[in-house]
Image (tube, coloured by chain):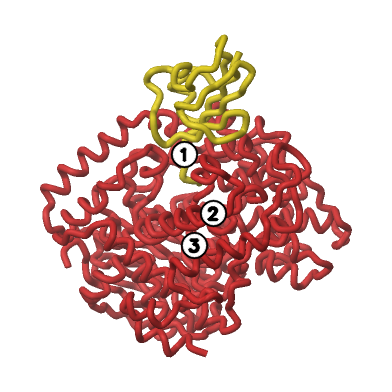
Chain colours: A red, B yellow
Amino acid sequence: MKGYTGKLLRVNLSDGKISKEEISESMQRDFLGGRGLAVKLLWDEVKRVDPLSERNKIIFSTGPLSGQLLPSSGKMVVASKSPLTGGYGDGNIGTMASVHLRKAGYDVLVVEGKSENPCYLLIEDEKVKILDASELWGKNTFESQDLLEKRHGKNSGILLIGPSGENLIRISTVLSQRGRAGGRPGMGAVMGSKNLKAIVIRGTGTISNFDDEKLKEYAKKAYEEIKGKEAYPFWMRQGTMQVFEWCNENHCLPTYNFREGVFEFSKEMDGYVLERMAVDRKGCPMCNMQCGHIVKDIKGERAELDYENVGMLGPNLGMKTLAEVALLNRMADEWGLDTISLGSCMGFLMEASEKGLIPEKIGWGDFDRAQRLIQEIGRGEGIGALVTKGVKLASEKLGKDSHRWAMHVKGLEISAYNCHGCPGMALSYGTSPIGASHKDAWVIAWEVSTDRFSYSKEKVEKIVEFQRIRGGFFESASVCRLPWVEVNFGLDWYPKFLEAITGHKRDWEELYQIGDRIYTLIRAFWKREIPSFDRTWDYPPLRWFEEAPSQGKLKGIKVDKEKYDQMLSWYYEIRGWDQNGIPSKETLDRLGLSEVTKEISP
Amino acid sequence: MVEMKFLGYLTDLAGTRKKEVFIESPKPLREILPPSFPEKNLIILIDGKPGDLDTLVSPGQSVILMPILSGG
């Protein structure tokens, strides 16, 4: 199909075999790209394996919109069986590697096996080499990026891991371009388990589209539309950091390991503080609304901030200034640790210390101790070793009722929205296909704009709608969702882009069905890999059911478990899954996934 | 007096993050906002409860206007 290279590059690090395969038109049609192609490949090829063994595979997948001269299209999906959750894991990353992979002639890269020694991949169009990475091993992501750029050119597309990924710390992510990260559910550890330090891609070809002239015309108008939006100037000043004030105002800021929803030092680290501290801005390729705001941290080093990082490393740990948070963020990026999970793991240890459940003294807001703690977690040493597999397993090891305040769903740590007073957002976390991620259905704004405390079916329908658009379409077309909601860029543009690229007219109804197919296959993957999977896996942390914040207007408010269960049942009904969240035979047949049935039947 | 608070890009449209507006009797919210204010994608809380641009605002009430965001 036009707009795709139609090629998959497969590299086996055990035997050094490199092969190029066709991606069928039916795969492109039914799964679109990105997350869709990734889950189909994982379903077909990765069955009941240890995620950190050489039998697992890691997939770098683009979509038809990736790397095109279109707004915010420099994205790719990194996916694997997650060592953090045991289920399906992925994340998107904005990177030049996306553009270069497509220009090199591939839509998808699959890496399998395990190298005997540290290595990195070099992909230059047709030429693919596995090279020695002994010089890079042990270096942080900034040093490694510098070294690889020096060796292969500044404009190369580079994906890499830090020392935490090498050390198989399961909250490790994949990094690019000094601070861009993706693959929260331990994708960095999967690369580490294969002794794969980095992937360097240099592509020189072009993508063959159905109607390039039309696409250029659309692109020009689309970029202009974005720049002309009323919300654009403010976005360029604060980016996602405007969410900080928004969350504090709506009492959903993650504070002291999600105990509270408002923070007494919020004015020391909101978007207005960022505006005063910002020294630079950076973003993904093809983006004219760059979201990466660079500040100098407390030691004068550059750190790229956005809301999730600041929420989780700031109020969630009781830090008092943005310059402190910036340093913690820089350290996380250097080590290759996911900032969200790291903030949750550190909050968990601080609370455990406060409760006297561990001997170490780690106080809220203790900046010096927090820096040492990041090093301990990155190395898997000291008290840091307790959380290297995430808060779920840490709480199982620690016991003493700590699972009640281990803030995760399915083993993936909650991102930066506290949901004591947002049952819809709690359900969104509960049903996110990778564990507690906000990216699939950030329903909280809609929820606050209506009746935030209700448990209505309408709210559940809204979650499914968002999942279809965000987790279904955007993750599979592999293009950034931020222009849509943040500056009100029209959704009606995307079917037009797709038609100019592929020559096929596809409306939103058809795109929703692709999203449903992807969600259902991901759900089947969870069930196949974790046979005990049932509806309890879709519950949010007990803290939201059992404890209410002690401060602010949500004082006394918590999520009602019975009513949450009712919403979850409605969710399953809409999805066509049974009351344990398992896709029914009828649903699988309807979505063209009949062959899946036998693998998840009891 | 009505206390008005603006978040996100709405501060650019209002020209301020906070202001007080004097009214003698209840008025629809839109009448005390700048004429260029958007009609859609807004979160409006009046004394903490969801409202819209046609909701009547009375002296002594507080209004918060926020954009719909997408998350980080």
- Which mark is drawn over residue A456? 2
How far apart marks 2 and 1 lie (CA) works out to 20 Å
Q: Does residue A291 sit above or below A189 in this rendering?
A: above
**Residue at horizontal 21 percent and vertical 60 percent from the top:** A506
Q: Which of A358 and A514 is in front in this view?
A: A514
Which residue lies under the disc numbered 1?
B68
Do the residues at pointers 2 and 1 share their chain? no
Q: Where is residue A122 in the image (x, y as percent from the top left)?
A: 35, 67
Q: Which part of the image, by quadrant, shows the N terminus of chain A?
A: bottom left
Q: Position of residue A192 (x, y in %)?
A: 53, 71
Name which residue type carries label 2. Ser
Report whether A127 appears left or right of A252.
left
Q: Does residue B17 sit above or below A274 in this rendering?
A: above
Q: Which-is-in-front pick, marks 1 and 3?
A: 1
Which residue lies under the disc numbered 3?
A183
User: Mark 2: few, some, or many residues within 10 Å (few <14, many ≥20)?
Assistant: some
Q: Does residue A116 sit above or below A488 in this rendering?
A: below
Report whether A423 appears left or right of A233.
right
Instruction: Please say if the residues under marks 2 and 3 sit with CB atoms less than 8 Å apart.
Output: no
